[in-house]
Amino acid sequence: MKTPYHKVRHYTGRVGWLRAAVLGANDGIVSTSSLLLGVAATQESKGAILIAGVAGLVAGAMSMAAGEYVSVQSQSDTEKADLERERTELKTDKEGELRELAQIYVDRGLEPRLARQVAEQMMAHDALAAHARDELGLSELAVARPYQAAFASALSFSVGAALPLGAAVLCPKQLLVPVLSAGSLAFLAGLGAVAAKTGGAPLLKAVLRVTFWGALAMGLTALVGKFVGPVV
C-alpha cells in the first residue's frame, strides 16, 4: 500500500506561460497606448490614430509570437543537444557519469558513501532524468515550450493592445490624450496586480514597477509626437 502524500502546486510551475503572458500583455498596453499617444500628439485625425493603433496591434502580436518562438526554440534546441550528449556519455562511460552524479550530491552536503548510494539508486531508476535534473538543471517545470510561449505572447499582446485601442475608439478626440493615459496606467496597474497574485509576488511592488515603466514609455512617445510631428 502506497503512503499518501500531500502534493503542493508551486508557483514555479507557472513560470513558462506566466512570463510570456505578462510580457505580451504589458508590451501590448505600453506599445499601443504609446503609439496612439504619439500619433494623437501630432494633431492627426482620429481615423489616422485608430489605423495606427490597429496596425500596431497586428504587427506587435506577430512580432511577439515570432520573437518568442525563435527565442524559446533556440533554448529548446540547446536543451535537446545537452540531453543527447548526456545520453551518449551514459552509454560510453556509465561509471564516470555515476561518479559525477555522486560528486554533485557530495557538493550538496551528503557524505561520499551516501552520495554514491543515492546516485546508484537514481541512475537505476532513470539515469538520464537524474543527470538532466541534477547536472544540467533541467526539469519538467522549466522545459522550453516554443509553441506555448509564442501563442501566449501573441494572445496576451492582442488582449493588452485591445484595451487602449478600445478606449481610443470610445473616447472623443479632444479627450483622447488624458483618458488614454489614465486608462492605460490603470490597465497596467491591473496587469501588475494579476501577475503578482498569479506568481505569488508582492502586490504593491509589482504594480508600481509596471506602471512606472509604462508611464515613462508613454510620456517619451508623446513628447516625440508633440515636437517631431510638426517638423515632419
Image (cartoon, rainbow, N blue to C red):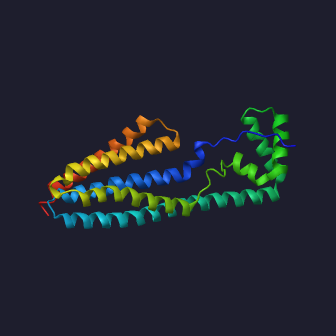
What is the tally of numbered marks visible in this picture?
0
Q: Position of residue 96 (x, y in %)?
A: 81, 49
Image: 155 above or below 26: below
Instruction: Indicate the quadrant containing the N terminus: top left, top right, bottom left or bottom right.
Output: top right
Indicate left or right for 212 with 152 as reference: left
Q: Position of residue 229 (x, y in %)?
A: 15, 60
Identify the image quadrant of residue 203.
top left
Q: Nearer the viewer, residue 201 or 139?
A: 201
In the image, farthest residue toward the front = 170
Q: Nearer the viewer, residue 33 or 163?
A: 163
Indicate left or right for 61 with 142 as reference: left
Q: Nearer the viewer, residue 99 or 138?
A: 138
- Residue at image position (42%, 39%) is 206
Indicate left or right for 198 with 211 as reference: right
Q: Position of residue 93 (x, y in %)?
A: 82, 54
Please indicate, yes or no, whether residue 71 appears anywhere in the rendered image. Answer: no
Instruction: Indicate the quadrant containing the C terminus: top left, top right, bottom left or bottom right.
Output: bottom left
Please indicate, yes or no, whether residue 113 appears anywhere in the rendered image. Answer: yes
Indicate left or right for 136 with 49 as reference: right
Q: Nearer the viewer, residue 196 or 113?
A: 196
Q: Position of residue 128 (x, y in %)?
A: 76, 54
- Residue at image position (83%, 50%) is 125
- Residue at image position (62%, 54%) is 143
Identify the image quadrant of residue 116.
top right
In the image, farthest residue toward the right = 1
- Residue at image position (49%, 41%) is 197
Identify the image quadrant of residue 40.
bottom left
